Image (cartoon, grey):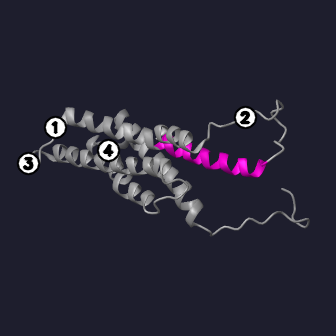
C-alpha cells in the first residue's frame, strides 16, 4: 500500500509542507503537537503500507511458484489442492488489500473495525500454514525451509504484527496506564 500512502498523501495534503527554520534540533513554533500527532498517524500508515505491499507481492509470487511446481487440481495430490487453497487465500488477501487501500484514501480517518481481524484470520494465518505445507516442512525438518516460503511466512507475520500493534492494540486495548516517575522512585 505504498500506493495507498501516496494516494492518501495527495488526497489529504501530506505533501503540503514548508520549511519553518533551518535548525534540525529546534522545535517548530506553531502547531507542534498537532503536526507531531499527524506525523505519527502518517508513520503508522506508512509502516502498514509497506507491510501490506510486501505481503501481497510475496503471496502471489509464492502462489505462482507453487502453481508452476504442483499445478492446481482438485482430484490431484495434496500439493495440488494446497496450491488451489493458496490461490483462494491470495484472492482473499487481494480483497483485504483493496479494502485497506479504500480505507486509507477515501475513508480516512475512519476505519473498518473488522478489517484487521479479517486480514489476519483469512489471509495471514492461512498463508503461513499453507507456506509450511507446500514447502514440505512437515515432511522434513524446519531447517530445510525453502527461501521463498520463508520470505512469504515472514511477510505474513510482519503484516499481522503491524495490524495487531497498530490497529488493535492502539485503538482497542486500554489495559495500560502511563504513570510518570515520582520523586520517591529510585533510579536504576
Q: CA distance from mark 3 to mark 1?
A: 11 Å
Corner quadrant of residue 26? top right
- Span of residues in magenta: 31-51
Q: Are marks 2 and 4 in contact (CB under 8 Å)?
A: no
Mark closest to the chain's N terminus, 2 or 3: 2
Q: CA distance from mark 1 to mark 4?
A: 15 Å
What residue is pinned by disc 1? 71
For this rendering, which residue is in front, 162 or 102?
Answer: 102
Mark closest to the chain's N terminus, 1 or 2: 2
Helix, strand, or loop for circle 4? helix
Helix, strand, or loop for circle 2? loop
Mark closest to the chain's N terminus, 2 or 4: 2
Disc nearest the viewer among 2 and 4: 2
Quarter of the C terminus within the rendering: bottom right
Q: Are marks 3 and 1 in contact (CB under 8 Å)?
A: no
What residue is pinned by disc 3? 75
Asked if the stretch drawn in magenta spans residue 47, the answer is yes
Tell me the crowding category of disc 1: few under 14, some 14 to 19, or many 20 or more residues within 10 angstroms, Cα based.
some
Residue furthest to the right: 183
Disc nearest the viewer among 1 and 2: 2
Badge number at residue 18: 2
Amino acid at each position: 500500500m505504498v500506493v495507498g500512502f501516496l494516494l492518501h498523501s495527495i488526497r489529504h495534503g501530506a505533501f503540503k509542507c514548508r520549511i519553518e527554520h533551518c535548525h534540525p534540533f529546534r522545535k517548530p513554533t506553531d502547531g507542534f503537537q498537532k503536526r507531531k500527532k499527524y506525523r505519527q498517524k502518517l508513520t503508522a500508515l506508512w509502516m502498514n503500507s509497506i507491510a501490506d505491499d510486501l505481503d501481497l507481492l510475496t503471496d502471489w509470487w509464492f502462489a505462482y511458484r507453487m502453481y508452476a511446481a504442483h499445478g492446481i487440481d482438485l482430484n490431484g495430490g495434496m500439493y495440488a489442492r494446497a496450491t488451489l487453497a493458496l490461490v483462494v487465500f491470495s484472492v482473499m488477501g487481494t480483497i483485504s488489500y483493496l479494502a485497506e487501500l479504500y480505507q486509507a484514501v477515501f475513508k480516512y480517518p475512519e476505519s473498518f473495525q473488522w478489517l484487521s481481524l479479517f486480514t489476519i484470520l483469512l489471509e495471514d494465518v492461512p498463508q503461513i500454514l499453507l507456506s509450511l505445507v507446500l514447502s514440505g516442512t512437515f515432511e522434513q525438518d524446519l531447517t530445510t525451509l525453502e527461501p521463498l516460503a520463508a520470505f512469504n511466512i515472514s511477510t505474513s507475520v510482519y503484516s499481522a504484527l503491524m495490524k495487531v500493534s497498530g490497529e488493535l492494540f492502539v485503538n482497542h486495548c486500554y489495559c495500560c496506564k502511563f504513570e510518570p516517575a515520582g520523586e520517591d522512585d529510585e533510579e536504576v
